[in-house]
Image (cartoon, rainbow, N blue to C red):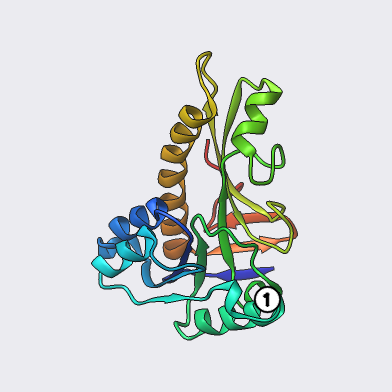
Amino acid sequence: MRVSKAGRLVVLVSGSGTNLQALLDASADPSYGARVVAVGADREGIEGLARAARANIPTFVEKLGDYATRAEWDEALASRIAAYDPDLVVSAGFMKILGKPTLDAFPVLNTHPALLPSFPGAHGVRDALAHGVKVTGCTVMLADEGVDTGPIVAQEAVPVLPDDDEAVLHERIKTVERRLLVDIVGRMAREGWTVSGRTVRIGNDSGGEST
């Protein structure tokens, strides 16, 4: 069992950074309990980095193509993250699977636009629609070395409406996802959390889920 708190956040992004912005907005209130101390990316010129710059948050970029091997990139990314001494790393639309150096050194929180363990992978919304589900949702999890296989911290359901296509449904899921991520990060920072096997509990919460 591990007991942790999450006051200092390093957020990793690969695109527009809407989840990052939600965390930046929340952390502007000192009572939130967590603050973003750095934003990292795997590419330059993205809106996520621009959002960090506008908020005067330090940024760094580690591009996979700058390294001869994936293992070297994994080590470099972990080293850059470690320089900011985070309590929690948040993968907020980061489009790379994090390697063992990062996962061994820090707890990493990730999100997925489906109710895991159903519909993991890059096309969770599309796969849920193709399967004909009536309810899908989003998951906040602690990342491990698999693809969307880490211990689940919280989930929230989103109904599938008759006229939904992938884009419309995904936007509705992302709205819920941002709110759930902000809530969970704040609670983890203020109350701490424990991990026992695949069970994650925040503070005195008996289940670690939100519905």
Q: Is residue 129 above or below residue 82?
A: above
Q: Nearer the viewer, residue 199 or 204?
A: 199
Residue name at image x 56 percent, y 85 percent: 79
Residue 180 position, x and y percent, is 46, 45
> In the rendered image, which quarter contains the N terminus?
bottom right
Tally the marks: 1
| Mark 1 closeness class: few <14, some 14–19, many ≥20 residues within 10 Å | few
Residue name at image x 60 percent, y 72 percent: 64
Q: Secondary structure at mark 1?
A: helix
Residue 25 position, x and y percent, is 28, 56
In this image, 125 relative to 34: left or right? right
Q: Is residue 164 above or below residue 196?
A: above
Residue name at image x 56 percent, y 60 percent: 109
Q: Is residue 138 above or below residue 31?
A: above
The quadrant in which residue 65 appears is bottom right
Q: Nearer the viewer, residue 199 or 117?
A: 117
Q: Nearer the viewer, residue 96 or 133?
A: 96
Residue name at image x 54 percent, y 29 percent: 166
Residue 76 position, x and y percent, is 59, 83
- Label 1, on which residue? 104
Residue 18 position, x and y percent, is 38, 51
The quadrant in which residue 51 appears is bottom left
Callout 1 amino acid: Asp
